[in-house]
Image (spheres, grey):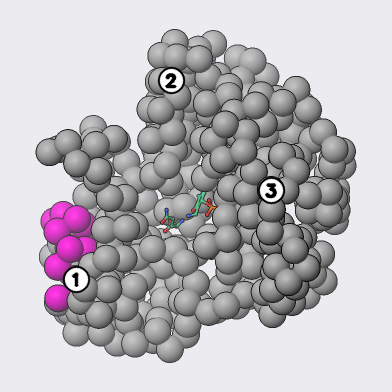
Amino acid sequence: LLGEDGSVAPTIFAEMSALAAATGALNLGQGFPDEDGPEAVLEAARTAISHGANQYPPGRGTTDLLEAIAEHQQRFYGLRLDPTSEIVVTAGATEALAATLLALVDGPDDEVVVFEPYYDSYAACVALSGATLRTVPLRWPGFQPDLDELAAAVSDRTRIILVNDPHNPTGAVFERAVLEEIVRLAHRHDAVIVTDEVYEHLVFDVAHTPIATLPGAAERTLAISSGGKTFRTTGWKIGWVSGPADLLTAVLTVKQFLTYVNGSPFQPAIATGLRLPDGFFHDLASDMKGKRDILGAGLEAAGFDVSPPQGSYFTVADAAPLGAEDAGDFCRTLPERAGVVAIPLTAFVTARRRAEYATLVRFAACKRVDVLEEAASRLRALS
Ligand code: PMP
Ligand code: GLN
């Protein structure tokens, strides 16, 4: 995980946000919103601090938040969870992923199947856990996995199939047939399914289907989500894992030595968010869909080929029509050439597959409309 000279290598997000700050370019790189989330959620955190929620919360999470997560899973997906044994609150989805991998895999003989490109912490956490990473490619432009390639990647050595749906960086929402195949393979090879659903409420024209709702899946699925994207509070780091009590005991055992507990005033605030009326969640998705459309149209007008996402904060575009040969070089010079920051997809793939993603670039749509419009107009100057 170290840089080539032995130093701490910044993540691609830290590198690109630093570039945005240094150059004054518009930051369509790192996926964080540039507007605050709902006032009721912010106010709940302020109130919690004023009312003394400033010491260690309970290890599994506050009772109120655990109940709010269970209510949310029931309201949106019809999933029934026991808040006392089937949910653990974590320091963001990031800690949930780390604790789950560290808890469930044992060493190089255990394999973790991941769809590639993948969110950067996946490969890092698999490496920390000592397990072996197996990847299944998601190819331009649709980014759905090939079912034969998926089946070939899963074997009796597979301990975990890790599924990020809706998907970062591609914006893909997996088709039902893909989800069904994942469940079938997990049964056949006795694997655990771990889902990362942090973009669950950011889907356009399609519904989000948690794998745990598929027949036979709940008993072997750990579902991870977080309040960061849904409530525009990415800095609060309130996440959670839900699923079978015995698996969660293992996750909690690791979590207590990673952070012990986290975010006491933010836990009641995220509980408030999870209890917001349906209209909030509906408006969130339609707002992001509008932004996706503005960004997509802007990228096309600038000469990129665009893969319209069905979910997430992101849009992937091919910079080859603009003469790009290497997305890393393209993104590192884009601030200077156009005053915009974006992320090369090569940051999300294994070295051996870099060539396949060489000209693809991820743009974040989770920014103000005026920022997206200004970025589109700057990018038009490229061609
Ligand atoms: N998984 C995915 C796919 C993400 O995009 C992110 C957000 N960057 C995370 C996990 C991390 O979420 P959190 O900020 O809640 O740790
Ligand atoms: N999830 C965000 C992204 O993909 C940022 C996460 C981070 O900076 N680690 O851009």
Residue at screen point 41% across, 20% down: 130
Residue at screen point 58% across, 48% down: 91
Label 2 sits on what residue type? Answer: Ala
The image quadrant that residue 299 belongs to is bottom left
The image quadrant that residue 51 belongs to is bottom right
Give whichever of discs 3 and 1 has the lower sequence position.
3
Q: Considering the numbered disc 3 on the image, is that residue within a helix, a strand or a loop?
A: loop
- Circle 1 sits on which residue? 334
Q: Residues within 10 Å of mark 2 (few under 14, many from 20)?
A: many
Magenta part, dominant SS: helix
Q: Nearer the viewer, mark 3 or mark 1?
A: 3
- Circle 3 sits on which residue? 56
Spatial distance from mark 2 to mark 1, Cα to Cα? 37 Å
Q: Assign the N terminus to one quadrant of the image.
A: top left
- Circle 2 sits on which residue? 131
Q: Residues within 10 Å of mark 1 (few under 14, many from 20)?
A: some
Q: Considering the numbered disc 1 on the image, is that residue within a helix, a strand or a loop?
A: helix
Label 3 sits on what residue type? Answer: Tyr
Spatial distance from mark 3 to mark 1, Cα to Cα? 44 Å
Q: Residues within 10 Å of mark 3 (few under 14, many from 20)?
A: few
Can residue 136 be seen here? The reply is no
Q: Is residue 331 magenta?
A: yes
